Image (tube, grey):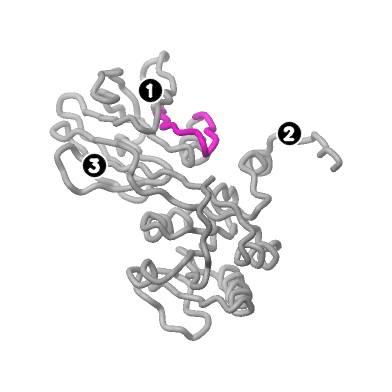
Amino acid sequence: MVAKKFTFKKVAIYSSTKDKKIISIANQVVEVLANLNVICLAPESSKIPALDNSKPLSDEKIIKDSDMIIAIGGDGTLLSSARKFGVEGIPILGINLGNLGFLTDIAPSELTTSLNEILNGKYVQDERIFLEASFDGAKESHKALNEVVLHSGSIAQLIEYDLFIDEEFVYRQKADGLIVSTPTGSTAYSLSGNGPIISPEVEAITLLPMFPHSLNARTLITGDEKIIRLKLVEKGKAFLSMDSHLNLKVSSKEDVIIRKADTKLTLIHPVDNSFFSSCRNKLGWSLGVPPKNT
């Protein structure tokens, strides 16, 4: 958690998908914003049309003018808004219309009450790290909120790679690939690979081999200040993806460098937000155990 408090005078509404339910929720958000005299902005990149007859603004203008992004949809929508706006320092609030929704934590039934409280300053916020991946020697880099994945690009096809952490050789591995994830990403792709769930405040990076050839291969957790280098063995070819968004070709001639990015994502939550409560609800923990009376 961080101490800095934001004031929300201009709020942009964003979604990466478009359907009647999302538009209905967006209309409700616009109504709440209007009642609080908060200016509503519409990014051009959003799939939601401008609902108050205002002109859609470029993403550059949204980054410059908005105090917060309200992302309506599932975690995929929030990841998209994080890549476009969160990485530029704009805080994001998620309204959950997806199935799991570890990042988007306001249900539509609680929208009006929660949004009123948040816009009146009753909220909590936390910072999540991005990973930054680049090819050795290249100036261009790509950011991921959940995970960076080195993979073969084919079903049941092994790749062989060397792993270095802070330039120390760790191991050579044959596997379908390697998932390098943040604590935020521990409840995403890494979770489907039976990786550990990492509480968001833990300063760690998880390295999870995908279907390794060796029975001795295990998940490795290291500090988030470490620099990870991946090198394909011999003339192997692979691909690198960031949050399942990009798919870049990797050759044995160029090492992959992964590190914590300088920028962070700020998430806005209702005051009763709880990571462990989300785990219980989304993952079915303690099914059949009656809640304690309060």
Q: Name the residue under label 2.
A: 286
Q: Name the residue under label 3.
A: 134
Range covered by the magenta-colored residues: 194-208
Label 2 Cα neighbours within 10 Å, binned few <14 / some 14-19 / many ≥20:
few
Label 3 Cα neighbours within 10 Å, binned few <14 / some 14-19 / many ≥20:
some
Q: Relative to 27, does residue 261 appear above or below in the rendering?
A: above
Q: Mark 1 points at which residue?
A: 212
Chain-order first, disc 3 or disc 2: 3
Q: Are marks 1 and 2 in contact (CB under 8 Å)?
A: no
Residue at x 45% of width, y 70% of height: 47
Determine whether the residue tagged by mark 1 lies in a helix, strand or loop: loop
Residue 231 in sight in this render = yes
Please name the amino acid that badge 2 sits on. Answer: Ser
Chain-order first, disc 1 or disc 2: 1
Residue at x 66% of width, y 53% of height: 271
Residue 210 in sight in this render = no
Q: Which of 214 and 283 is in front in this view?
A: 283
Residue at x 22% of width, y 42% of height: 249
On whether residue 128 falls in the magenta region, the answer is no
Residue farthest toward the top in the current orientation of the protein? 216
Please name the amino acid that badge 3 sits on. Answer: Ser
Q: Do the residues labelled 3 and 2 touch (CB within 8 Å)?
A: no
C-alpha gap between disc 1 and disc 2: 31 Å
Q: Relative to 94, does residue 284 appear above or below in the rendering?
A: above
Give x and y (percent) for residue 238: 25, 36
Residue at x 38% of width, y 45% of height: 130
